[in-house]
């Protein structure tokens, strides 16, 4: 008997940052639900990681950008270029790019630099801009996306994906402590939360393990996955720091790690 596909699965494509690392690619996560493949952020190294989990760029239906910094958008140009000029295959269904206000302007500026090298054939790409000042929601056939602004840059959004049968995963993107993120993550099955630096190296616009744990506890999430680790995080006990504020299931992200929900 063939194995049943999970209701929703999450694969970490990149658990790192802008700092080059053999262990961790820049930020990206693949969420699969309802027969669709959704990518969250497209940092450098994402396309290679997709191949490592037997996924082609033509299989991706949606890309959601948390914000526009290069470690989250760095492979957008090469993704579009590779989509436009394939060796053997071509995209059959349109891809939808979702981000906060200003993304269309960003894309138009990329076209000013790269011209038609990053412009797909008519009908093969859609852009959806979400409200970067307030809560927003989009209902698709197989899943629902909710977004809310968080504390990083003007366009920064966190996302909540809810499957047809109610499994919910929240992707924080980059953020400092955010009551909005607590609200969005309420009772989620999984919170994928940035934890850029150890507690003692806290910087504005990013979380630490104990702050991420505080958000997860306030939101009463069922599982917390920490990600977006600068190299300094690999030199300390991140789990111990997070346990100061969070007591439920804790996962420290590694590239190519998968979590499934039946």
Image (tube, helix red, strand yellow):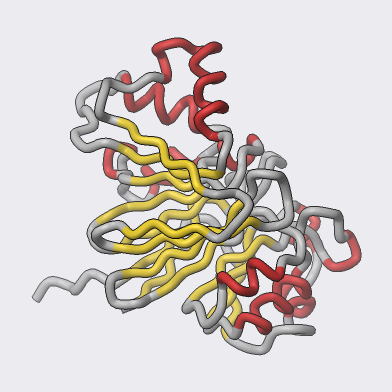
* Residue pictured at 50% horizontal, 74% vertical: 190
- Residue 70 occupies which quadrant of the picture? top right
Q: 212 or 100, which is in the foreground?
A: 100
Q: Is residue 175 above or below residue 260?
A: above
- Residue 93 occupies which quadrant of the picture? top left
Q: In the displayed structure, does residue 92 sit left or right of residue 231?
A: left
* Residue pictured at 72% horizontal, 45% vertical: 153
Query: Residue furthest toward the bottom?
Result: 247
Q: 185 or 206, which is in the foreground?
A: 185
Q: In the displayed structure, does residue 238 sit left or right of residue 171?
A: right
Q: 94 or 56, which is in the foreground?
A: 94
Residue 129 at x, y percent in the picture: 48, 42
* Residue pictured at 78% horizontal, 53% vertical: 205
- Residue 10 occupies which quadrant of the picture? bottom left
Task: Locate the N terminus by quadrant.
Answer: bottom left
Query: Residue furthest toward the right?
Result: 200
Residue 17 at x, y percent in the picture: 67, 47
* Residue pictured at 49% horizontal, 25% vertical: 77
Q: How many marks?
A: 0
Q: In the displayed structure, does residue 160 sit left or right of residue 225?
A: left
Q: 144 or 73, which is in the foreground?
A: 144
Q: Is residue 18 above or below residue 110?
A: below
Q: Is residue 258 above or below residue 210?
A: above
Q: Is residue 3 above or below residue 92?
A: below
Residue 47 at x, y percent in the picture: 43, 38
Task: Locate the C terminus by quadrant.
Answer: bottom left
Residue 251 at x, y percent in the picture: 58, 74
């Amino acid at each position: 008997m063939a194995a049943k596909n999970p209701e929703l699965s999450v694969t970490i494509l990149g658990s790192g940052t802008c700092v080059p690392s053999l262990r961790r690619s820049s930020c990206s996560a693949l969420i699969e639900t309802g027969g669709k493949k959704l990518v969250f952020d497209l940092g450098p190294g994402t396309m290679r990681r997709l191949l490592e989990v037997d996924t082609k760029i033509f299989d991706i239906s949606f890309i959601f950008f948390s914000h526009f910094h290069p470690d989250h958008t760095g492979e957008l140009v090469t993704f579009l270029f590779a989509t436009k000029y394939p060796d053997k295959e071509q995209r059959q269904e349109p891809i939808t790019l979702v981000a906060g206000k200003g993304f269309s302007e960003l894309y138009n500026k990329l076209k000013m630099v790269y011209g038609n090298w990053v412009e797909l054939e008519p009908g093969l790409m859609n852009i959806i801009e979400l409200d970067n000042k307030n809560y927003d929601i989009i209902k698709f056939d197989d899943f629902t996306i909710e977004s809310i602004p968080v504390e990083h840059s003007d366009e920064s959004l966190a996302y909540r994906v809810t499957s047809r049968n109610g499994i919910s995963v929240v992707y924080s993107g980059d953020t400092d402590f955010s009551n909005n993120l607590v609200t969005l993550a309420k009772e989620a099955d999984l919170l994928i939360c940035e934890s850029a630096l150890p507690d003692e190296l806290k910087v504005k616009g990013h979380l630490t393990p104990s702050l991420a744990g505080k958000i997860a506890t306030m939101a009463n999430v069922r599982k917390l996955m920490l990600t977006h680790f600068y190299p300094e995080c690999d030199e300390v006990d991140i789990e111990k720091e997070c346990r100061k504020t969070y007591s439920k299931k804790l996962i420290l992200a590694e590239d190519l790690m998968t979590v499934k929900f039946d």
